[in-house]
Amino acid sequence: MPKQTFFNLPAEKRQQIVDAAVDEFAEHGLENASTNRIIAASEISKGSFYQYFEDKHDVFDYLVTLLGEEKQAYFADKRPPDDNMDTFGYYRWIIKTGMKFNSSSPRLVQAVSRVLLNEGVYYGKKFEKYRRQTTDSLQAMITQAIQRGEVDPSIDVELAVMVMETWTNAISTYFLREGMKEDDVMAWVQSPKTQEKIDKLLYVMEYGLRKTESKFGKNA
Amino acid sequence: MPKQTFFNLPAEKRQQIVDAAVDEFAEHGLENASTNRIIAASEISKGSFYQYFEDKHDVFDYLVTLLGEEKQAYFADKRPPDDNMDTFGYYRWIIKTGMKFNSSSPRLVQAVSRVLLNEGVYYGKKFEKYRRQTTDSLQAMITQAIQRGEVDPSIDVELAVMVMETWTNAISTYFLREGMKEDDVMAWVQSPKTQEKIDKLLYVMEYGLRKTESKFGKNA
DNA sequence: CGGTCATGTGACTAGATGGTCACATTATAT
DNA sequence: ATATAATGTGACCATCTAGTCACATGACCG
Protein backbone atom coordinates (compact mmCIF):
# COMPACT_ATOMS: atom_id res chain seq x y z
CA MET A 1 0.00 0.00 0.00
CA PRO A 2 1.22 3.51 -0.83
CA LYS A 3 1.73 5.83 2.12
CA GLN A 4 -0.82 8.39 3.27
CA THR A 5 1.13 11.24 1.66
CA PHE A 6 0.32 9.78 -1.73
CA PHE A 7 -3.40 9.82 -1.08
CA ASN A 8 -3.17 13.41 0.19
CA LEU A 9 -1.93 14.47 -3.22
CA PRO A 10 -4.19 16.34 -5.66
CA ALA A 11 -5.85 13.86 -8.01
CA GLU A 12 -4.09 15.34 -11.01
CA LYS A 13 -0.62 14.73 -9.63
CA ARG A 14 -1.60 11.25 -8.51
CA GLN A 15 -2.78 10.48 -12.01
CA GLN A 16 0.52 11.75 -13.43
CA ILE A 17 2.42 9.25 -11.31
CA VAL A 18 0.04 6.40 -12.08
CA ASP A 19 0.34 7.11 -15.81
CA ALA A 20 4.12 7.06 -15.62
CA ALA A 21 4.12 3.81 -13.64
CA VAL A 22 1.63 2.15 -15.99
CA ASP A 23 3.80 3.02 -18.97
CA GLU A 24 6.92 1.77 -17.27
CA PHE A 25 5.45 -1.58 -16.23
CA ALA A 26 3.68 -2.06 -19.55
CA GLU A 27 6.97 -1.48 -21.36
CA HIS A 28 9.43 -3.22 -19.08
CA GLY A 29 7.55 -5.55 -16.74
CA LEU A 30 8.11 -5.46 -13.00
CA GLU A 31 11.66 -6.69 -12.48
CA ASN A 32 13.03 -4.60 -15.33
CA ALA A 33 11.08 -1.50 -14.41
CA SER A 34 13.17 1.48 -13.30
CA THR A 35 12.04 3.68 -10.43
CA ASN A 36 14.33 6.36 -11.83
CA ARG A 37 12.38 6.39 -15.10
CA ILE A 38 9.04 6.46 -13.29
CA ILE A 39 10.28 9.44 -11.29
CA ALA A 40 11.56 11.24 -14.39
CA ALA A 41 8.36 10.61 -16.37
CA SER A 42 6.05 11.69 -13.57
CA GLU A 43 8.09 14.84 -12.96
CA ILE A 44 8.40 14.43 -9.24
CA SER A 45 11.61 14.38 -7.24
CA LYS A 46 13.27 11.26 -5.99
CA GLY A 47 12.65 12.19 -2.39
CA SER A 48 8.95 12.61 -3.06
CA PHE A 49 8.67 9.20 -4.65
CA TYR A 50 9.97 7.54 -1.53
CA GLN A 51 7.59 9.60 0.55
CA TYR A 52 4.69 8.15 -1.46
CA PHE A 53 5.83 4.55 -1.92
CA GLU A 54 8.06 1.93 -0.33
CA ASP A 55 9.51 0.93 -3.69
CA LYS A 56 8.37 -0.06 -7.17
CA HIS A 57 6.62 -3.20 -5.89
CA ASP A 58 4.49 -0.95 -3.77
CA VAL A 59 3.53 1.05 -6.85
CA PHE A 60 2.71 -2.13 -8.73
CA ASP A 61 0.52 -3.42 -5.92
CA TYR A 62 -1.40 -0.19 -6.12
CA LEU A 63 -1.90 -0.60 -9.87
CA VAL A 64 -3.32 -4.07 -9.30
CA THR A 65 -5.74 -2.66 -6.74
CA LEU A 66 -6.65 0.13 -9.12
CA LEU A 67 -7.36 -2.31 -11.93
CA GLY A 68 -9.50 -4.37 -9.60
CA GLU A 69 -11.51 -1.34 -8.60
CA GLU A 70 -12.00 -0.22 -12.18
CA LYS A 71 -13.09 -3.69 -13.20
CA GLN A 72 -15.56 -3.87 -10.35
CA ALA A 73 -16.97 -0.48 -11.28
CA TYR A 74 -17.27 -1.53 -14.90
CA PHE A 75 -19.11 -4.74 -14.12
CA ALA A 76 -21.30 -3.13 -11.46
CA ASP A 77 -24.12 -2.22 -13.84
CA LYS A 78 -23.64 -5.06 -16.30
CA ARG A 79 -25.73 -8.20 -16.28
CA PRO A 80 -25.80 -11.11 -18.73
CA PRO A 81 -28.57 -10.57 -21.30
CA ASP A 82 -30.29 -13.85 -20.52
CA ASP A 83 -30.91 -14.99 -16.96
CA ASN A 84 -31.35 -18.59 -18.06
CA MET A 85 -27.95 -18.83 -19.69
CA ASP A 86 -26.00 -21.99 -19.09
CA THR A 87 -22.45 -21.91 -17.73
CA PHE A 88 -20.79 -21.81 -21.12
CA GLY A 89 -22.97 -18.94 -22.22
CA TYR A 90 -22.20 -17.10 -19.01
CA TYR A 91 -18.47 -17.71 -19.43
CA ARG A 92 -18.72 -16.45 -23.01
CA TRP A 93 -20.43 -13.31 -21.76
CA ILE A 94 -17.79 -12.79 -19.06
CA ILE A 95 -14.96 -13.16 -21.55
CA LYS A 96 -16.50 -10.78 -24.07
CA THR A 97 -17.47 -8.19 -21.50
CA GLY A 98 -14.03 -8.53 -19.95
CA MET A 99 -12.47 -7.81 -23.31
CA LYS A 100 -14.57 -4.68 -23.68
CA PHE A 101 -13.39 -3.58 -20.26
CA ASN A 102 -9.81 -4.29 -21.28
CA SER A 103 -10.21 -1.95 -24.25
CA SER A 104 -11.30 0.81 -21.91
CA SER A 105 -8.02 0.69 -19.91
CA PRO A 106 -5.68 -1.11 -22.26
CA ARG A 107 -2.41 0.22 -20.90
CA LEU A 108 -3.24 -0.56 -17.29
CA VAL A 109 -4.38 -4.04 -18.33
CA GLN A 110 -1.17 -4.50 -20.27
CA ALA A 111 0.98 -3.42 -17.34
CA VAL A 112 -0.71 -5.69 -14.82
CA SER A 113 -1.29 -8.70 -17.08
CA ARG A 114 2.25 -8.71 -18.34
CA VAL A 115 3.56 -9.10 -14.84
CA LEU A 116 0.93 -11.45 -13.45
CA LEU A 117 0.71 -13.77 -16.45
CA ASN A 118 4.40 -13.97 -17.25
CA GLU A 119 6.80 -12.82 -14.58
CA GLY A 120 4.37 -13.99 -11.94
CA VAL A 121 4.93 -17.60 -12.92
CA TYR A 122 8.53 -17.38 -11.77
CA TYR A 123 8.25 -15.16 -8.72
CA GLY A 124 5.56 -17.51 -7.51
CA LYS A 125 4.41 -16.83 -3.99
CA LYS A 126 4.41 -13.07 -4.31
CA PHE A 127 1.52 -13.16 -6.79
CA GLU A 128 -0.35 -16.22 -5.63
CA LYS A 129 -3.03 -14.14 -3.93
CA TYR A 130 -3.99 -12.55 -7.24
CA ARG A 131 -4.17 -15.84 -9.12
CA ARG A 132 -6.24 -17.42 -6.39
CA GLN A 133 -9.05 -14.93 -7.01
CA THR A 134 -9.61 -16.13 -10.58
CA THR A 135 -9.01 -19.76 -9.67
CA ASP A 136 -11.59 -19.68 -6.90
CA SER A 137 -14.34 -18.11 -8.96
CA LEU A 138 -13.66 -20.49 -11.85
CA GLN A 139 -13.81 -23.42 -9.48
CA ALA A 140 -17.18 -22.33 -8.13
CA MET A 141 -18.46 -21.88 -11.66
CA ILE A 142 -17.37 -25.33 -12.74
CA THR A 143 -18.65 -27.11 -9.66
CA GLN A 144 -22.05 -25.59 -10.35
CA ALA A 145 -21.80 -26.51 -14.03
CA ILE A 146 -21.18 -30.15 -13.16
CA GLN A 147 -24.15 -30.18 -10.80
CA ARG A 148 -26.29 -28.76 -13.58
CA GLY A 149 -25.08 -31.54 -15.87
CA GLU A 150 -23.43 -29.16 -18.31
CA VAL A 151 -19.84 -30.25 -17.87
CA ASP A 152 -18.66 -33.81 -18.30
CA PRO A 153 -18.55 -35.19 -14.72
CA SER A 154 -15.68 -37.54 -15.60
CA ILE A 155 -13.44 -34.47 -15.89
CA ASP A 156 -12.22 -33.55 -12.43
CA VAL A 157 -12.80 -30.03 -11.25
CA GLU A 158 -9.10 -29.23 -10.89
CA LEU A 159 -8.48 -30.08 -14.52
CA ALA A 160 -11.49 -28.16 -15.75
CA VAL A 161 -10.22 -25.14 -13.83
CA MET A 162 -6.86 -25.50 -15.54
CA VAL A 163 -8.56 -25.65 -18.93
CA MET A 164 -10.64 -22.54 -18.34
CA GLU A 165 -7.76 -20.68 -16.72
CA THR A 166 -5.59 -21.51 -19.69
CA TRP A 167 -8.17 -20.14 -22.10
CA THR A 168 -8.83 -17.07 -20.02
CA ASN A 169 -5.12 -16.33 -20.08
CA ALA A 170 -4.73 -17.22 -23.76
CA ILE A 171 -7.51 -14.81 -24.71
CA SER A 172 -5.93 -12.10 -22.57
CA THR A 173 -2.60 -12.70 -24.28
CA TYR A 174 -4.35 -12.67 -27.66
CA PHE A 175 -5.91 -9.33 -26.76
CA LEU A 176 -2.55 -7.90 -25.73
CA ARG A 177 -0.67 -9.22 -28.74
CA GLU A 178 -3.18 -8.56 -31.53
CA GLY A 179 -5.53 -5.95 -30.12
CA MET A 180 -2.81 -3.57 -28.99
CA LYS A 181 -1.51 -3.31 -32.55
CA GLU A 182 -4.74 -1.60 -33.60
CA ASP A 183 -5.41 2.13 -33.55
CA ASP A 184 -8.87 1.65 -32.10
CA VAL A 185 -8.76 -1.29 -29.71
CA MET A 186 -12.41 -1.00 -28.77
CA ALA A 187 -13.45 -1.16 -32.42
CA TRP A 188 -11.19 -4.16 -32.93
CA VAL A 189 -12.70 -6.02 -29.98
CA GLN A 190 -16.26 -5.36 -31.09
CA SER A 191 -15.62 -6.11 -34.75
CA PRO A 192 -17.51 -9.16 -36.07
CA LYS A 193 -14.20 -10.77 -36.99
CA THR A 194 -12.85 -10.68 -33.43
CA GLN A 195 -16.17 -11.68 -31.90
CA GLU A 196 -16.40 -14.62 -34.28
CA LYS A 197 -12.90 -15.70 -33.35
CA ILE A 198 -13.81 -15.73 -29.67
CA ASP A 199 -17.02 -17.60 -30.40
CA LYS A 200 -15.18 -20.25 -32.35
CA LEU A 201 -12.51 -20.56 -29.69
CA LEU A 202 -15.03 -21.12 -26.94
CA TYR A 203 -16.90 -23.49 -29.19
CA VAL A 204 -13.75 -25.58 -29.46
CA MET A 205 -13.35 -25.42 -25.70
CA GLU A 206 -16.88 -26.79 -25.34
CA TYR A 207 -16.93 -29.40 -28.05
CA GLY A 208 -13.28 -30.11 -28.82
CA LEU A 209 -11.29 -30.19 -32.01
CA ARG A 210 -12.28 -33.68 -33.08
CA LYS A 211 -14.90 -34.25 -35.70
CA THR A 212 -17.68 -36.17 -34.03
CA GLU A 213 -21.08 -37.46 -35.07
CA SER A 214 -22.98 -35.13 -32.83
CA LYS A 215 -21.16 -32.25 -34.45
CA PHE A 216 -22.10 -33.36 -37.92
CA GLY A 217 -25.68 -32.62 -37.13
CA LYS A 218 -24.69 -29.13 -36.06
CA ASN A 219 -22.52 -28.23 -39.02
CA ALA A 220 -24.25 -29.95 -41.90
CA MET B 1 26.73 -17.43 -33.09
CA PRO B 2 29.65 -17.67 -30.66
CA LYS B 3 33.08 -16.88 -32.08
CA GLN B 4 35.56 -19.51 -33.25
CA THR B 5 37.63 -19.14 -30.07
CA PHE B 6 34.73 -20.59 -28.11
CA PHE B 7 34.59 -23.71 -30.24
CA ASN B 8 38.38 -24.11 -29.95
CA LEU B 9 37.96 -24.48 -26.19
CA PRO B 10 38.29 -27.86 -24.49
CA ALA B 11 34.85 -29.43 -24.11
CA GLU B 12 35.07 -29.30 -20.33
CA LYS B 13 35.55 -25.55 -20.20
CA ARG B 14 32.82 -25.03 -22.77
CA GLN B 15 30.47 -27.06 -20.63
CA GLN B 16 31.37 -24.97 -17.59
CA ILE B 17 30.32 -21.82 -19.42
CA VAL B 18 27.14 -23.38 -20.79
CA ASP B 19 26.18 -24.57 -17.31
CA ALA B 20 26.67 -21.12 -15.86
CA ALA B 21 24.65 -19.51 -18.65
CA VAL B 22 21.84 -22.05 -18.33
CA ASP B 23 21.59 -21.38 -14.63
CA GLU B 24 21.60 -17.63 -15.14
CA PHE B 25 18.88 -17.62 -17.81
CA ALA B 26 16.79 -20.20 -15.96
CA GLU B 27 16.92 -18.05 -12.85
CA HIS B 28 16.67 -14.56 -14.28
CA GLY B 29 15.40 -14.77 -17.86
CA LEU B 30 17.16 -13.02 -20.71
CA GLU B 31 16.72 -9.32 -20.03
CA ASN B 32 17.53 -9.67 -16.34
CA ALA B 33 20.47 -11.98 -16.88
CA SER B 34 23.85 -10.60 -15.87
CA THR B 35 26.93 -11.30 -17.97
CA ASN B 36 28.98 -10.50 -14.89
CA ARG B 37 27.33 -13.34 -13.00
CA ILE B 38 27.78 -15.75 -15.89
CA ILE B 39 31.45 -14.83 -15.97
CA ALA B 40 31.87 -15.28 -12.24
CA ALA B 41 30.04 -18.62 -12.17
CA SER B 42 31.94 -20.06 -15.11
CA GLU B 43 35.26 -18.94 -13.64
CA ILE B 44 36.57 -17.25 -16.74
CA SER B 45 37.78 -13.68 -17.05
CA LYS B 46 35.76 -10.87 -18.48
CA GLY B 47 38.10 -10.46 -21.42
CA SER B 48 37.73 -14.13 -22.30
CA PHE B 49 33.95 -13.94 -22.28
CA TYR B 50 34.00 -11.24 -24.91
CA GLN B 51 36.46 -13.27 -26.94
CA TYR B 52 33.92 -16.10 -27.01
CA PHE B 53 30.65 -14.19 -27.42
CA GLU B 54 29.30 -10.90 -28.68
CA ASP B 55 27.10 -10.48 -25.62
CA LYS B 56 24.55 -12.39 -23.57
CA HIS B 57 22.11 -12.60 -26.48
CA ASP B 58 24.81 -14.43 -28.37
CA VAL B 59 25.09 -16.92 -25.52
CA PHE B 60 21.33 -17.36 -25.41
CA ASP B 61 21.14 -17.98 -29.15
CA TYR B 62 23.69 -20.70 -28.69
CA LEU B 63 21.63 -22.31 -25.93
CA VAL B 64 18.60 -22.37 -28.22
CA THR B 65 20.68 -24.07 -30.91
CA LEU B 66 22.00 -26.52 -28.35
CA LEU B 67 18.52 -27.38 -27.14
CA GLY B 68 17.42 -27.90 -30.75
CA GLU B 69 20.33 -30.26 -31.39
CA GLU B 70 19.69 -32.23 -28.23
CA LYS B 71 16.02 -32.53 -29.03
CA GLN B 72 16.78 -33.72 -32.54
CA ALA B 73 19.24 -36.29 -31.21
CA TYR B 74 16.68 -37.48 -28.68
CA PHE B 75 13.92 -37.92 -31.22
CA ALA B 76 16.26 -39.44 -33.83
CA ASP B 77 15.69 -43.04 -32.75
CA LYS B 78 12.13 -42.62 -31.46
CA ARG B 79 9.08 -43.55 -33.48
CA PRO B 80 5.43 -43.60 -32.46
CA PRO B 81 4.48 -47.13 -31.34
CA ASP B 82 1.65 -47.47 -33.86
CA ASP B 83 2.09 -46.44 -37.49
CA ASN B 84 -1.66 -46.22 -37.99
CA MET B 85 -2.15 -43.68 -35.23
CA ASP B 86 -4.47 -40.82 -35.97
CA THR B 87 -3.37 -37.20 -35.56
CA PHE B 88 -4.54 -36.92 -31.98
CA GLY B 89 -2.71 -40.09 -31.02
CA TYR B 90 0.40 -38.79 -32.72
CA TYR B 91 0.13 -35.44 -30.97
CA ARG B 92 -0.33 -37.24 -27.67
CA TRP B 93 2.81 -39.24 -28.35
CA ILE B 94 4.77 -36.11 -29.30
CA ILE B 95 3.70 -34.33 -26.13
CA LYS B 96 4.55 -37.25 -23.86
CA THR B 97 7.86 -37.99 -25.53
CA GLY B 98 8.65 -34.29 -25.47
CA MET B 99 8.04 -34.24 -21.74
CA LYS B 100 10.41 -37.17 -21.27
CA PHE B 101 13.01 -35.25 -23.22
CA ASN B 102 12.38 -32.20 -21.08
CA SER B 103 13.14 -34.26 -17.97
CA SER B 104 16.48 -35.22 -19.44
CA SER B 105 17.63 -31.57 -19.75
CA PRO B 106 15.31 -29.76 -17.40
CA ARG B 107 17.49 -26.75 -16.66
CA LEU B 108 18.24 -26.05 -20.31
CA VAL B 109 14.56 -26.42 -21.13
CA GLN B 110 13.70 -24.09 -18.29
CA ALA B 111 16.21 -21.47 -19.44
CA VAL B 112 15.07 -21.46 -23.06
CA SER B 113 11.33 -21.87 -22.47
CA ARG B 114 11.22 -19.15 -19.89
CA VAL B 115 12.57 -16.66 -22.39
CA LEU B 116 10.74 -17.85 -25.49
CA LEU B 117 7.34 -18.42 -23.87
CA ASN B 118 7.28 -15.33 -21.69
CA GLU B 119 9.75 -12.60 -22.50
CA GLY B 120 9.54 -13.55 -26.17
CA VAL B 121 5.95 -12.36 -26.32
CA TYR B 122 7.05 -8.80 -25.66
CA TYR B 123 10.33 -8.60 -27.54
CA GLY B 124 8.43 -9.94 -30.53
CA LYS B 125 10.41 -9.91 -33.73
CA LYS B 126 13.65 -11.13 -32.18
CA PHE B 127 12.14 -14.53 -31.39
CA GLU B 128 9.66 -14.92 -34.20
CA LYS B 129 11.91 -17.35 -36.06
CA TYR B 130 11.77 -19.81 -33.17
CA ARG B 131 8.01 -19.63 -32.80
CA ARG B 132 7.50 -20.10 -36.52
CA GLN B 133 9.09 -23.54 -36.36
CA THR B 134 6.42 -24.91 -34.02
CA THR B 135 3.64 -23.02 -35.77
CA ASP B 136 4.59 -24.41 -39.16
CA SER B 137 4.77 -28.02 -38.08
CA LEU B 138 1.49 -27.74 -36.17
CA GLN B 139 -0.13 -26.20 -39.22
CA ALA B 140 1.02 -29.07 -41.45
CA MET B 141 -0.26 -31.57 -38.89
CA ILE B 142 -3.67 -29.97 -38.69
CA THR B 143 -4.11 -29.55 -42.42
CA GLN B 144 -3.47 -33.25 -42.80
CA ALA B 145 -5.83 -34.05 -39.94
CA ILE B 146 -8.63 -32.13 -41.61
CA GLN B 147 -8.02 -33.97 -44.87
CA ARG B 148 -8.20 -37.24 -43.00
CA GLY B 149 -11.51 -36.16 -41.54
CA GLU B 150 -10.22 -36.22 -37.97
CA VAL B 151 -10.60 -32.54 -37.17
CA ASP B 152 -13.81 -30.61 -37.52
CA PRO B 153 -13.47 -28.88 -40.93
CA SER B 154 -15.61 -25.96 -39.79
CA ILE B 155 -12.73 -24.94 -37.52
CA ASP B 156 -10.28 -22.91 -39.56
CA VAL B 157 -6.68 -24.03 -39.59
CA GLU B 158 -5.36 -20.83 -38.03
CA LEU B 159 -7.62 -21.28 -35.02
CA ALA B 160 -6.79 -24.94 -34.62
CA VAL B 161 -3.09 -23.99 -34.64
CA MET B 162 -3.76 -21.48 -31.90
CA VAL B 163 -5.55 -24.13 -29.86
CA MET B 164 -2.77 -26.67 -30.16
CA GLU B 165 -0.05 -24.07 -29.64
CA THR B 166 -1.84 -22.90 -26.51
CA TRP B 167 -1.95 -26.45 -25.15
CA THR B 168 1.63 -27.20 -26.10
CA ASN B 169 2.71 -24.10 -24.19
CA ALA B 170 0.38 -24.78 -21.29
CA ILE B 171 1.79 -28.27 -20.85
CA SER B 172 5.32 -26.90 -21.04
CA THR B 173 4.45 -24.35 -18.38
CA TYR B 174 2.81 -27.07 -16.29
CA PHE B 175 5.99 -29.11 -16.57
CA LEU B 176 8.12 -26.16 -15.51
CA ARG B 177 5.88 -25.14 -12.65
CA GLU B 178 4.95 -28.51 -11.16
CA GLY B 179 7.62 -30.88 -12.43
CA MET B 180 10.56 -28.75 -11.39
CA LYS B 181 9.41 -28.86 -7.78
CA GLU B 182 10.09 -32.61 -7.69
CA ASP B 183 13.37 -34.23 -6.75
CA ASP B 184 13.15 -36.71 -9.59
CA VAL B 185 11.56 -34.96 -12.55
CA MET B 186 11.77 -38.01 -14.81
CA ALA B 187 9.93 -40.14 -12.26
CA TRP B 188 7.31 -37.45 -11.90
CA VAL B 189 6.74 -37.25 -15.65
CA GLN B 190 6.40 -40.99 -16.03
CA SER B 191 4.24 -41.47 -12.96
CA PRO B 192 0.73 -42.72 -13.69
CA LYS B 193 -0.70 -39.61 -12.07
CA THR B 194 1.07 -37.22 -14.42
CA GLN B 195 0.45 -39.39 -17.48
CA GLU B 196 -3.24 -39.57 -16.62
CA LYS B 197 -3.38 -35.81 -16.25
CA ILE B 198 -1.94 -35.35 -19.73
CA ASP B 199 -4.32 -37.95 -21.14
CA LYS B 200 -7.30 -36.22 -19.62
CA LEU B 201 -6.10 -32.83 -20.81
CA LEU B 202 -5.73 -33.98 -24.38
CA TYR B 203 -9.05 -35.76 -24.12
CA VAL B 204 -10.66 -32.44 -23.26
CA MET B 205 -8.84 -30.83 -26.17
CA GLU B 206 -10.33 -33.47 -28.46
CA TYR B 207 -13.84 -33.69 -27.10
CA GLY B 208 -14.37 -30.51 -25.14
CA LEU B 209 -15.61 -29.78 -21.65
CA ARG B 210 -19.29 -30.03 -22.39
CA LYS B 211 -21.26 -33.11 -21.54
CA THR B 212 -22.57 -34.46 -24.83
CA GLU B 213 -24.62 -37.46 -25.86
CA SER B 214 -21.80 -39.06 -27.80
CA LYS B 215 -19.66 -38.84 -24.68
CA PHE B 216 -22.23 -40.57 -22.56
CA GLY B 217 -21.65 -43.68 -24.58
CA LYS B 218 -17.95 -43.38 -23.83
CA ASN B 219 -18.16 -42.70 -20.12
CA ALA B 220 -21.14 -44.66 -19.02
C1' DC C 1 66.77 -20.03 -28.76
C1' DG C 2 63.72 -16.28 -30.67
C1' DG C 3 59.62 -14.91 -32.96
C1' DT C 4 54.77 -14.99 -33.91
C1' DC C 5 50.21 -15.64 -33.10
C1' DA C 6 46.27 -17.12 -30.19
C1' DT C 7 44.42 -16.86 -25.80
C1' DG C 8 43.87 -15.17 -21.06
C1' DT C 9 43.34 -11.22 -17.76
C1' DG C 10 41.43 -7.78 -14.69
C1' DA C 11 41.72 -2.87 -13.92
C1' DC C 12 39.19 0.64 -15.79
C1' DT C 13 35.36 3.54 -18.03
C1' DA C 14 30.96 5.39 -18.36
C1' DG C 15 26.54 4.88 -17.19
C1' DA C 16 22.47 3.21 -14.56
C1' DT C 17 20.46 1.41 -10.39
C1' DG C 18 17.82 1.88 -5.71
C1' DG C 19 17.84 4.41 -1.74
C1' DT C 20 19.07 8.18 1.87
C1' DC C 21 19.33 12.49 4.02
C1' DA C 22 20.19 17.31 5.26
C1' DC C 23 18.06 21.04 3.83
C1' DA C 24 14.40 24.17 1.45
C1' DT C 25 9.81 25.22 0.70
C1' DT C 26 5.07 25.46 1.66
C1' DA C 27 0.84 25.02 4.38
C1' DT C 28 -1.51 25.16 8.82
C1' DA C 29 -2.50 26.75 13.25
C1' DT C 30 -1.91 29.92 16.87
C1' DA D 1 3.63 37.31 12.69
C1' DT D 2 5.42 33.16 14.50
C1' DA D 3 5.82 28.47 15.46
C1' DT D 4 5.02 23.78 13.93
C1' DA D 5 4.27 20.33 11.04
C1' DA D 6 4.01 18.35 6.32
C1' DT D 7 5.88 18.07 1.94
C1' DG D 8 9.32 18.78 -1.70
C1' DT D 9 14.19 18.40 -3.42
C1' DG D 10 18.35 16.80 -5.64
C1' DA D 11 23.14 15.94 -4.47
C1' DC D 12 25.21 12.05 -2.91
C1' DC D 13 26.36 6.99 -1.92
C1' DA D 14 27.31 2.26 -2.67
C1' DT D 15 26.52 -1.05 -5.95
C1' DC D 16 25.71 -2.95 -10.19
C1' DT D 17 25.86 -3.00 -15.31
C1' DA D 18 28.13 -3.96 -20.19
C1' DG D 19 32.07 -3.44 -22.55
C1' DT D 20 37.21 -2.13 -23.69
C1' DC D 21 42.05 -2.40 -23.81
C1' DA D 22 46.94 -2.59 -22.67
C1' DC D 23 49.32 -6.09 -21.13
C1' DA D 24 50.61 -11.09 -19.56
C1' DT D 25 50.80 -15.81 -20.52
C1' DG D 26 50.86 -19.59 -23.26
C1' DA D 27 51.52 -22.54 -27.53
C1' DC D 28 53.57 -23.55 -31.77
C1' DC D 29 57.13 -23.20 -35.37
C1' DG D 30 61.50 -22.26 -37.48
Image (cartoon, coloured by chain):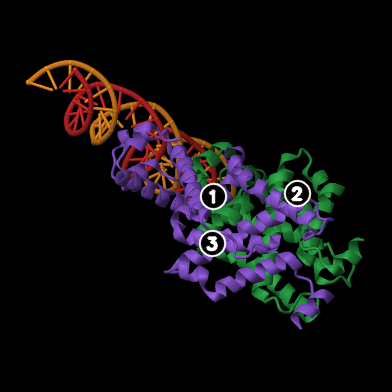
Chain colours: A purple, B green, C red, D orange
What amino acid type should be assigned to the residue bearing mark 3?
Answer: Met
- Tell me what residue is drawn at x 52 percent, y 61 percent: A176
Above or below C28: residue B65 = below
Above or below A101: residue A123 = above
Quadrant of res D3: top left
Mark linked to residue A99: 3
The C terminus of chain A: image quadrant:
bottom right
Q: Nearer the viewer, residue B120 or B59?
A: B120
Q: Is residue A32 visible?
A: no
Instruction: Please identify, in this view, whether the residue under mark 3 or under mark 1 is nearer the observer.
Output: 3
**Which residue in the structure is indicated by mark 1?**
B30
- Tell me what residue is drawn at x 45 percent, y 49 percent: A25
- Residue A46 percent across, percent down from the top left: 31, 36
What amino acid type should be assigned to the residue bearing mark 1?
Answer: Leu
The chain containing the residue under callout 3 comes to A
Gap in angstroms between the C-alphas marked 2 and 1: 32 Å
Q: Nearer the viewer, residue A99 or C8?
A: A99
